[in-house]
Image (cartoon, rainbow, N blue to C red):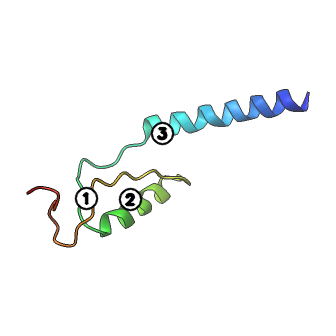
């Protein structure tokens, strides 16, 4: 009984989280620079998100992609 209850609760919370992810949107602005990470965190916090996945293409001190020759 305990196992079934835990599974049902997990599935319910997982469904709620998926719905939040589907409805989450940010303004159509590309954030550049180190302050962008901070801005993403602040935006997620105001929307009540506790976990945030941020994908970074590259970091470079010059602000340009140094992988290109």
User: Is the residue marked by circle 1 packed among few (<14), some (14-19), or many (20+) residues within 10 Å?
Assistant: few
Label 3 sits on residue: 21
Residue placed furthest toward the front: 69
> How far apart in space, not on screen, are marks 3 and 1 (Cα)?
20 Å
For marks 1 and 2 on the same chain, the one whose residue lies earlier in the sequence: 1
Task: Quote the CA–CA distance across marks 3 and 2.
Answer: 15 Å
Q: Residue furthest left?
A: 69
Residue 11 got which mark? none
- Please provide percent x and percent y for residue 21: 48, 39
**Do the residues bearing badges 1 and 2 touch, measured as CB atoms within 8 Å?**
yes
The answer to whether 53 appears left or right of 60 in the picture is right
| Marking on residue 31 | 1
Q: Residue at (16%, 71%) from the top-left corner?
A: 62
Q: Earlier in the sequence, mark 3 or mark 1?
A: 3
Q: Kindly give the residue lying farthest to the bottom in the view shown.
A: 61
Residue 42 lies left or right of residue 3; in this view the side is left
Where does the image place residue 5, in percent across and percent down from the top left? 83, 30
Position above or below: 39 against 24: below
What x and y, as percent, mark residue 15? Answer: 60, 31
Q: Residues within 10 Å of mark 3 (few under 14, many from 20)?
A: few
Look at the numbered disc 2 and give the secondary structure of its residue.
Answer: helix
Residue 44 image point, x, y percent: 45, 55
Assess disc 2: are there few (<14), some (14-19) or many (≥20) residues with their C-alpha within 10 Å of its C-alpha: some
Image mark for residue 40: 2
Is 27 or 34 nearer to us in this picture? 34
Quadrant housing the C terminus: bottom left
């Amino acid at each position: 009984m305990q196992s079934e209850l835990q599974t049902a609760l997990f599935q319910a919370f997982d469904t709620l989280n998926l719905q939040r992810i589907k409805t989450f949107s940010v303004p159509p602005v590309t954030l550049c620079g180190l302050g962008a990470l901070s801005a993403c965190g602040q935006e997620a916090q105001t929307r009540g998100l506790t976990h945030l996945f941020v994908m970074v293409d590259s970091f470079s001190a010059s602000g340009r992609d140094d992988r290109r020759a």
